[in-house]
Amino acid sequence: MKNKLGTEKRELEYYKPDNLIRSIKRSAKQHGFNGFFGVLYYTIKKNIDWLFSIIAYFAPFTGIRIFFHRLKGVKIGKRAFIGYQCVLDEVFPDFIEIGNDVSLAGGVWVLTHSTPYMHHSEMLKSFVAPVKIKDKAWITINVTILPGVTIGEGSIITAGSVVNRDIPDWVIAGGNPAKVIKKLK
């Protein structure tokens, strides 16, 4: 779904338990859709995107996974590989940009938003921010990439890492939180 508000970092409302209608209206508003028909369109499109996510998650071939993630709004370059059971943000998929020749191994999570409960508002920010994975990067198995991160060109993120800050070009990074381990030649 094309986000009507662009893909720049911005604050979001904090999550608060609410009835279904108010929750849908709040979410639609965060995506730039207002009024009855805007909320209706958003709701239908979001449910279709959810179905695309399920298909991509369980699809046996990377081409199918890429096709359905693109339909959701994820920007994916040429010759990319997306492994089995990857989760590319369900709420703001259009904030994800994956370059050419990028490989995401299985079980990778790419998150573009953080929406904590209201009672955490003094401690944590509620926001959405783009994630960019530059050309030739390799994200190995079970890596989590948090909102607002850029993975540098040709960089490798080691298994099980949590990436919470930008990673420069042509390095190996890993850990929780991920740190540069080695520069590549």
Image (spheres, rainbow, N blue to C red):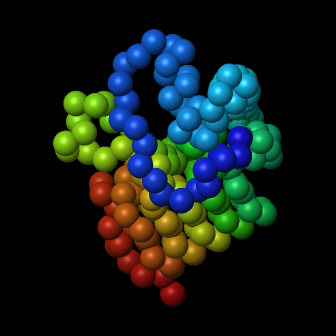
Is residue 13 visible in the rendered image? The answer is yes
Q: Residue at x 63, y 59 (%)?
A: 97
- Quarter assignment of residue 175: bottom left
Extreme residue in the top direction: 19
- The vertical placement of 47 against 141, above or below, is above
Of residue 14 and residue 53, the one placed in the foreground of this image is 14
Image coordinates for residue 135, horizontal then vertical, percent: 64, 71
Say whether residue 31 is left or right of residue 44: left
Q: Is residue 131 visible?
A: no
**Viewer-proximal residue among 69 and 62:** 69
- Residue at image position (30%, 57%) is 177
How many labels sit on residues?
A: 0
Residue at the image point whose x is 78% and y is 63% from the top = 78
As drawn, 69 above or below 172: above
Q: Quadrant of the N terminus?
A: top right
Q: Nearer the viewer, residue 61 or 96?
A: 96
Q: Position of residue 3 (x, y in %)?
A: 65, 46
Q: In the drawing, does residue 182 fall left or right of residue 72?
A: left
**Residue in the image at 58% along x and 56% along y:** 7
Give the image location of residue 113, x and y in percent. Answer: 46, 45
